Amino acid sequence: MQSTIYQKDIEQYFKLGKALAETKIKNRFEIRVFDERAEQTVADLLAYRNPQRTVFGIINNYLRFVKPIANKPTSKWPLDDRWAQFIGKYADKLRLAVSPEPVTLDQTIQWIKKQVAPSLKMLMAIDSAKSEDTLMTIIAEAKLSENQQVMIQQMLASPEEIMIQQPKHNGD
């Protein structure tokens, strides 16, 4: 999910040369939902046929403005009066929860290609030029999660080992 808040009147001023006072919409809040969250959003819209309820429920679940109070944890800060007025009668929250999918080896490889490899290449070049081993030290000190350890075992298991680990059913 992505959300964007921006000053629409300023945008119109720069794009169209429109005077700030002439712009009816001063601020804009956009919500972009994808995949399962989009499906949940559509399901809520179809169930209640109330776009305001759906949109404000999403906004209210993921964003809130509060009044800071010294010596109190942020979770105890009261809702800002202007925010409460903005949310108004749509104070319910709509959580767009998705069930986490297990990360596959292919997803990890794609993430490394897009996000990690350029930084690794940079560190390798620096290490090579300076005769250092910063990258290898970082890798050696890295801690694998339980899920990563399981993935290693699964990827390195022989077909026989996989067959042994399959649960037996009664009556088979």
Image (tube, rainbow, N blue to C red):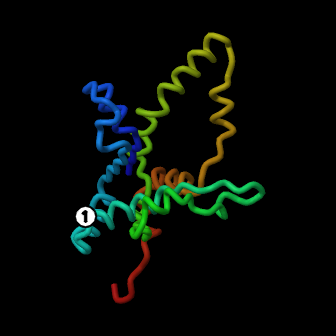
Q: Which of the two residues, 134 or 8, is positioned nearer the viewer here?
A: 8
Q: Residue furthest bottom?
A: 171
Give the side of residue 69 with respect to residue 39, left or right: right
Above-or-below relation of 97 to 167: above
Do we see residue 131 in this rendering?
yes
Give the side of residue 27 with respect to residue 83, left or right: left
Question: At 43% across and 62% down in the image, what residue appears?
Answer: 87
Q: Which of the two residues, 89 or 106, is positioned nearer the viewer here?
A: 89
Question: At 22% across and 70% down in the image, what residue appears?
Answer: 49
Q: Residue furthest right?
A: 71
Above-or-below relation of 135 to 111: above
Where does the C terminus fall, quadrant-wise?
bottom left
Above-or-below relation of 24 to 104: above
Numbered-mark total: 1
User: Dividing the picture into quarters, in which one does residue 131 lie?
Assistant: top right
Do we see residue 161 in this rendering?
no
User: Dividing the picture into quarters, in which one does residue 163 lie?
Assistant: bottom left
Q: Which of the two residues, 36 or 153, is positioned nearer the viewer here?
A: 36
- Percent across and percent down for residue 38 are 29, 58
Look at mark 1 in the image and give the residue it sits on: 42
What amino acid is at disc 1? Val
Question: At 51% across and 22% down in the image, what residue appears?
Answer: 121
- Percent across and percent down for residue 139 are 63, 35
Question: At 74% across and 60% down in the image, what residue appears?
Answer: 72
